[in-house]
């Protein structure tokens, strides 16, 4: 519950830059700043804001950027998608059958 309360006030801003199959992501929030580079289909390790480590990769399916990751602490899968809808980025997480969405407005 504490993590949920903190997440609701993190003021996260995401910048996504794409060059071919390579991506550069900048995440800036109240709690941390992160820059991440990845290539589609190539496995990498990512650390979430709460310190949870994930291993997986991103692919593009139609208009959707889809990430399939495995938590390193318990081996459970986490799937996330990012899609542009109008002037918004809709980010969805699915973990243990629970789906959460976050919507970012274009700056």
Image: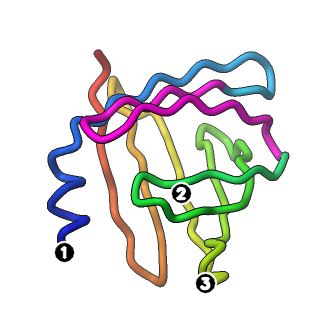
Counting residues from the start of the chain, the first of labels 3 and 2 encountered is 3
Is 35 in the magenta?
Answer: yes
- Mark 3 = which residue? 74
Q: Is residue 107 above or below residue 94?
A: above
Residue 91 in the figure: left or right of residue 40: left
Q: Secondary structure at mark 2?
A: strand
Residue 40 in the figure: left or right of residue 83: right
Q: Residues within 10 Å of mark 3 (few under 14, many from 20)?
A: few
Q: Is residue 53 above or below residue 74?
A: above
Cα–Cα span, label 3 and label 2: 18 Å
Front label number (2 vs 1): 1
Q: Residue at x 48, y 75 (%)?
A: 95
Residue 80: mark: 2
Q: Position of residue 18 (x, y in %)?
A: 67, 20
Q: Residue at x 33, y 56 (%)?
A: 101
Counting residues from the start of the chain, the first of labels 2 and 1 encountered is 1
- Mark 1 = which residue? 1
Cα–Cα span, label 3 and label 1: 20 Å
| The magenta segment | 24-41
Counting residues from the start of the chain, the first of labels 3 and 1 encountered is 1
Residue 86: mark: none
Q: Position of residue 98 (x, y in %)?
A: 39, 78
Q: Is residue 98 above or below residue 39?
A: below
Q: Position of residue 41 (x, y in %)?
A: 83, 46
Q: Residue at x 18, y 69 (%)?
A: 2
Q: Is residue 35 above or below residue 18?
A: below
């Amino acid at each position: 519950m504490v993590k949920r309360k903190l997440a609701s006030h993190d003021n996260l801003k995401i910048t996504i830059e794409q060059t071919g199959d390579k991506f550069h992501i900048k995440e800036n929030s109240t709690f941390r700043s992160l820059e991440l580079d990845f290539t589609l289909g190539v496995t990498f390790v990512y650390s979430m804001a709460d310190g949870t480590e994930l291993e997986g990769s991103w692919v593009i399916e139609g208009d959707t950027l889809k990430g399939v990751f495995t938590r390193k602490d318990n081996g459970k899968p986490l799937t996330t998608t990012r899609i542009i809808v109008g002037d918004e980025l809709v980010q969805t997480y699915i973990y243990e059958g629970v789906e959460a969405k976050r919507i970012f407005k274009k700056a």
